[in-house]
């Protein structure tokens, strides 16, 4: 049993800080080689741009659907291929981390390690680690079944963004989380900084304990998403004007902030020789420098928006207004009214 490859399922609602935490895991000098399976909601993979990468990591994207429903077969296939290549000496890794999309119900993902004989032979589900956004958690738990499922199945609950709320709010949230899942140990995580013992080698997933809480765990095979939640991708090779982009996003978040569940991407900004990684949740957003553009590399802005009833046409109109080449052209500013 101990020869099996340990697997960590990293989950949490949109914008909770999963990728930031995963970067922390990859930077830590723990001596382990990690294969990462990355699942995003939507057609474009952005998180691979955000993740720190080096030759010790294998990062595999799954962007053609949600890992908990439409692409579970792909997960089984990828795990099988990884195991085969490892046994053949073609790949070197010691463990696997699966980062789910923020809209995933992690229970069907965890099921995979008990329902498929080949996978259960080769892999050991070490733990489900759930990141909870202290700023938006209550709103997300109230409105989204997936957020509740992510907390309910966790072996570790890592509370992020505690610097954005007061101490009493954190205590109230911690009590609510304990009411949903009393067996999961809680810890706070600041920009991905937490004890690595709260993430790896927990040996916390117990099928018996899960069945005590969720007797239908092994029967749960189907999952569907709220039809009002959609994603769309904006791509543009022409550079964006940074002040206009900042002003546009400010207007959009003021008008549609509650509907903007998650937005992130890589920006090609005029006058910048490096990528700018941009991320936001509801009305909170930020940006930081990414890797430099290669001298022969095609520069492109790629933005993914995930939201509930978002007006795609209005967002895209505003982004066209942000193109650097429109500066000085006589045109009215875009309207963001529905």
Image (tube, helix red, strand yellow):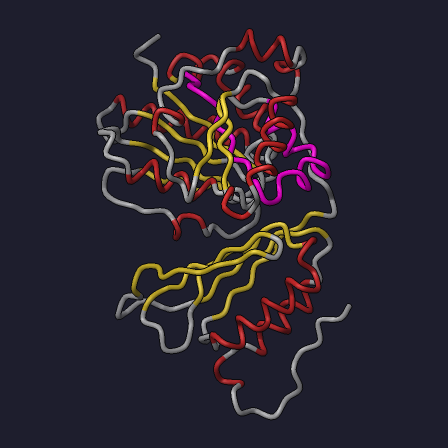
Whether 175 is drawn above or below 116: the answer is below
Whether 304 is drawn above or below 267: the answer is above
| On-image quarter of the N terminus | top left
Which residue is at a point 47% across and 74% down the rendered structure image? 242
Of 94 and 287, the residue lying toward us: 287
Which residue is at a point 65% across and 23% down the rendered structure image? 180
Q: Position of residue 137 (x, y in %)?
A: 62, 39
Taking the image as shown, residue 175 lies to the left or right of residue 285, namely: right
- Where, by quadrant of the figure, is residue 277 drawn? bottom left
Q: Position of residue 235 (x, y in %)?
A: 51, 65
Q: Position of residue 182 (x, y in %)?
A: 59, 17
Magenta-colored stretch includes residue 132 = yes
The residue segment tinted magenta is 124-152
Q: Position of residue 316 (x, y in %)?
A: 62, 69
Taking the image as shown, residue 295 lies to the left or right of residue 258, namely: left
Which residue is at a point 35% across and 59% down the rendered structure image? 290
């Amino acid at each position: 049993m101990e020869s099996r490859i340990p697997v960590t399922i990293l989950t949490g609602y949109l914008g909770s800080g999963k990728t930031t935490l995963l970067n922390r895991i990859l930077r830590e000098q723990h001596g382990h080689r990690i294969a990462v399976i990355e699942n995003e909601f939507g057609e474009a993979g952005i998180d691979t741009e955000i993740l720190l990468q080096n030759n010790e990591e294998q990062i595999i994207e799954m962007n053609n659907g949600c890992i908990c429903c439409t692409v579970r077969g792909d997960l089984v296939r990828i795990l099988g291929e990884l195991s085969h290549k490892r046994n053949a000496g073609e790949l070197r890794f010691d463990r696997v981390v699966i980062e789910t999309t923020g809209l995933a119900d992690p229970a069907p993902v965890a099921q995979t390690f008990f329902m498929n004989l080949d996978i259960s032979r080769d892999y050991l589900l070490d733990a489900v680690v759930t990141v909870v956004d202290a700023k938006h958690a209550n709103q997300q738990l109230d409105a989204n079944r997936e957020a509740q499922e992510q907390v309910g199945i966790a072996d570790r609950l890592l509370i992020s963004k505690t610097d954005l709320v007061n101490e009493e709010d954190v205590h109230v949230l911690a009590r609510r989380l304990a009411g949903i899942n009393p067996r999961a140990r809680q810890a706070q995580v600041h920009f991905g900084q937490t004890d690595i013992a709260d993430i790896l080698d927990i040996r916390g997933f117990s099928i018996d304990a899960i069945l005590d809480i969720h007797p239908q765990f092994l029967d749960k095979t189907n999952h569907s998403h709220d039809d009002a939640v959609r994603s769309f991708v904006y791509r543009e090779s022409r550079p964006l004007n940074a002040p206009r982009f900042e002003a546009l996003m400010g207007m959009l978040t003021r008008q549609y902030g509650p509907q903007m569940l998650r937005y992130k991407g890589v920006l090609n900004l005029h006058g910048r020789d490096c990528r700018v990684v941009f991320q936001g949740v509801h009305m909170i957003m930020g940006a930081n420098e990414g890797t430099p553009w290669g001298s022969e590399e095609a520069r492109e802005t790629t933005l993914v928006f995930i939201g509930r009833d978002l007006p795609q046409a209005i967002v895209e109109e505003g982004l066209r207004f942000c193109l650097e080449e429109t500066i000085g052209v006589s045109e009215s500013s875009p309207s963001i009214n529905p």
